[in-house]
Image (cartoon, rainbow, N blue to C red):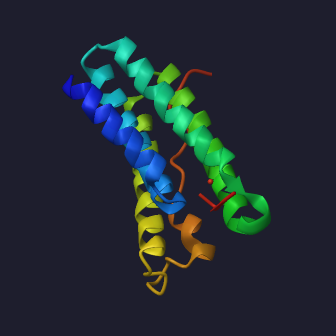
Amino acid sequence: MVVGGYQMYRQTDVITADPKRLVIMCYEEAIRNLNLAALTYSSGKYEAKGKSVQKALDIISELREALDFDRGGTIANSLDTLYSFMTSYIIKSDQARNVKGLQQVSSMLEQLKSAWEKVFLGHPDEPGLAPSTMTSTVSPPAEPQTTPSAGYLR
């Protein structure tokens, strides 16, 4: 019963949130799910890991779908490229059983979330936080050791 109450609260929070808050919430949930996937993988809970990875991928897909390329310009294009890379990297890391890869994407999402929070909260005058330079602060990790980008919302 408590879980149901929390789920209803969370659903109301999502429904009533403004688009900026929704972007932050998406980042928070993707980060949470990637961290949970790493934790559950380490403890051998593979089904739970799979669900967490899929949720993170779904969230990143939603972030990509929300990009407005007409209004977002270079930022939207950069974020689209970054989100595409993250999706591919999560899948490759999962297939390679590379927990560190999941953690690296989580770290990248954390950096993006932090940058968007600063922009949304009215601190774009800080160095490196202008929307035009925001995505350049996040550098993708190297490809995982395996066998042989919220622009503006619509």
- Locate residue 111 relative to residue 152 in the image: left or right: left
Query: The C terminus appears in which quarter of the rendering?
Result: bottom right
Question: Looking at the image, which residue is at 47% across and 46% down?
Answer: 15
Which of the 4 quarters of the picture holds residue 29?
top left
* Total marks in image: 0
Where 56 falls versus 111 (above or below)? above
Q: Position of residue 26 (x, y in %)?
A: 47, 47
The image quadrant of residue 67 is bottom right
Front-most of residues 143 and 37: 37
> Residue 63 or 94: which is nearer the viewer?
63
Q: Is residue 27 above or below residue 102?
A: below
- Please, is residue 37 above or below residue 117 in the view? above
Depth check: give the residue in front, 87 or 19. Answer: 19
Q: Position of residue 22 (x, y in %)?
A: 48, 53
The one nearer the camera, 66 or 143, is 66
Q: Is residue 10 visible?
A: yes
Q: Residue furthest right?
A: 70
Location of residue 30 in the rendering, given as x and y in whole percent from the top left corner: 44, 41
Q: Residue at x 80, y 64 (%)?
A: 70
**Which residue appears at 74% of the width and 67% of the height?**
71
Q: Residue furthest bottom?
A: 125
Regarding residue 144, the answer to whether it shows in the image is no
Where the N terminus falls, by quadrant?
Answer: top left
**Residue at 48% across, 34% down:** 56
